Amino acid sequence: MEATELWQLASWGGLGGLAAEVLHWYMLSRQPGKAARFKAGPIYWVSTFFMVLLGALIPVLYIEGAASALLCFHLGAATPVILQKLVVALPAVAQAQGPPDGLRAFYSW
């Protein structure tokens, strides 16, 4: 299947980003008490929304013209995973500035 329009690129990328975030929340639910701790905080849902949005945006910015829907899905899924790994890999100086149970703990799955 080929995505030729911008909205198609964004849709397939958004589905990829959504798949990555569903996997993220599933992995959090497999750790005792972790999902319950985060699902009550609106910052985590806003973060999840922006990860899916970035997943939709990256194929639009990255690809010029038509592309495979699978490639768009892959770019959309890879974007949240890469950003999550970057947050977890922040240097110790940046870690000390945030709360101990903040976004860094949310992204470490």
Image (spheres, rainbow, N blue to C red):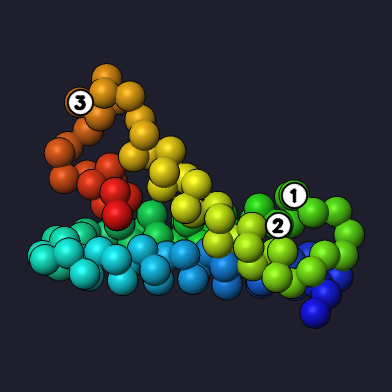
Q: Earlier in the sequence, mark 2 or mark 3?
A: 2
Other residues around mark 3 within 10 Å, as few (<14) / some (14–19) / many (≥20): few
Other residues around mark 1 within 10 Å, as few (<14) / some (14–19) / many (≥20): few
Residue 7 in view in this figure: no
Image x and y of residue 27, in percent: 29, 66
Asked whether the beta carbons under mark 2 and mark 3 sit within 8 Å of each other, the answer is no
Q: Secondary structure at mark 1?
A: helix
State the residue lying farthest toward the left: 33
Image x and y of residue 88, in percent: 34, 39
Q: Amino acid at mark 3?
A: Ala
Mark 2 vs mark 3, CA separation in Å: 34 Å
Give the residue pinned by disc 3.
Answer: 96
The disc at residue 89 is none
Mark 1 vs mark 2, CA separation in Å: 5 Å
- Of residues 45 and 27, the one nearer the viewer is 27
The disc at residue 59 is 2
Quadrant where the C terminus is found in the figure: bottom left
Q: Secondary structure at mark 2?
A: helix
Q: Secondary structure at mark 3?
A: helix
Other residues around mark 2 within 10 Å, as few (<14) / some (14–19) / many (≥20): many
Asked whether the beta carbons under mark 1 and mark 2 sit within 8 Å of each other, the answer is yes
The residue sitting at 70% across, 64% down in the picture is 72
- Of residues 49 and 35, the one nearer the viewer is 35
Give the residue pinned by disc 1.
Answer: 62
Seen in the image, is 4 located left or right of residue 109? right
The residue sitting at 57% across, 72% down in the picture is 15
- Of residues 7 and 78, the one nearer the viewer is 78
Q: Earlier in the sequence, mark 3 or mark 1?
A: 1
Query: How many numbered discs, if any?
Result: 3
